[in-house]
Amino acid sequence: MQRLNFTLDEQTVGLLDKLSETYYSGNKSLTVRAALESLAAHTEHDGWVVAGYTAVVLDMQAACHTCGSNHMKGEVLYRPVFERGHGKQAMATLPKKIWLECSACLEAIK
Ligand SMILES: [Zn+2]
């Protein structure tokens, strides 16, 4: 157990009072815990996120995933490296198609 100090505005205090009285016999700790668990359940989507990019020298013509520009054999494009993670950007499954970004689009993403 740890004691945390928060500064909450009037509205939040009112909401906490109301919810804790209604659902948790006035226990504010339990109310905050339930609220956080609910938030976690709604925001955390386990999946795949882009961890970084690795340079690829094309051995055949390819198009940029984002802008669609065409690039010739010998040019350098960037392939995303995926890792398990969660967040708004997370994808449920790994992309099935080849995914390469041109340097201009990568600059815009970063
Ligand atoms: Zn591009």
Image (tube, rainbow, N blue to C red):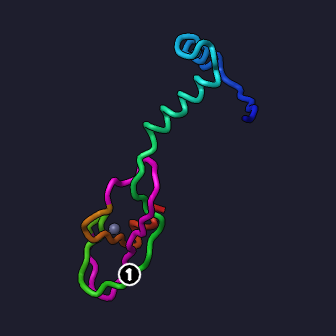
> Where is residue 106, by image quadrant?
bottom left
Label 1 crowd bin: few (<14), some (14–19), many (20+), radius 10 Å:
some
The type of residue carrying mark 1 is: Val
Image spot of residue 55 (x, y percent): 42, 79
Picture residue at 25% right of the left edge, 66% below the top: 96
Q: Is residue 61 left or right of residue 13?
A: left
Please, is residue 31 above or below residue 98 in the view?
above
Query: Is 70 a magenta residue?
Result: yes
Residue 108, visible in the rendered structure: no
Q: Is residue 25 or residue 109 the one in the foreground?
A: 25
Q: Position of residue 73 (x, y in %)?
A: 28, 87
Say which of 84 and 68 sits in front.
Answer: 84
Could you tell me which residue is drawn at 46 percent across and 56 percent down? 85
Position of 102 with respect to 20 (left or right) is left
Observer-nearest of 75 and 31 = 31
- Would residue 32 be visible to someone looking at this image? yes
Q: Is residue 23 left or right of residue 81?
A: right
Image coordinates for residue 83, horizontal then vertical, percent: 44, 63
Which span of residues is magenta-colored? Answer: 69-93
Please give the name of the residue rendered at 31% of the width and 69% of the height, measured from the top-left corner: 99
Dividing the picture into quadrants, the one containing residue 103 is: bottom left
State the residue at coordinates (26%, 73%).
63
Residue identifier under label 1: 56
Residue 41 on the magenta segment: no
Tell whether 80 sits left or right of 29: left
Q: Report the number of numbered marks.
A: 1
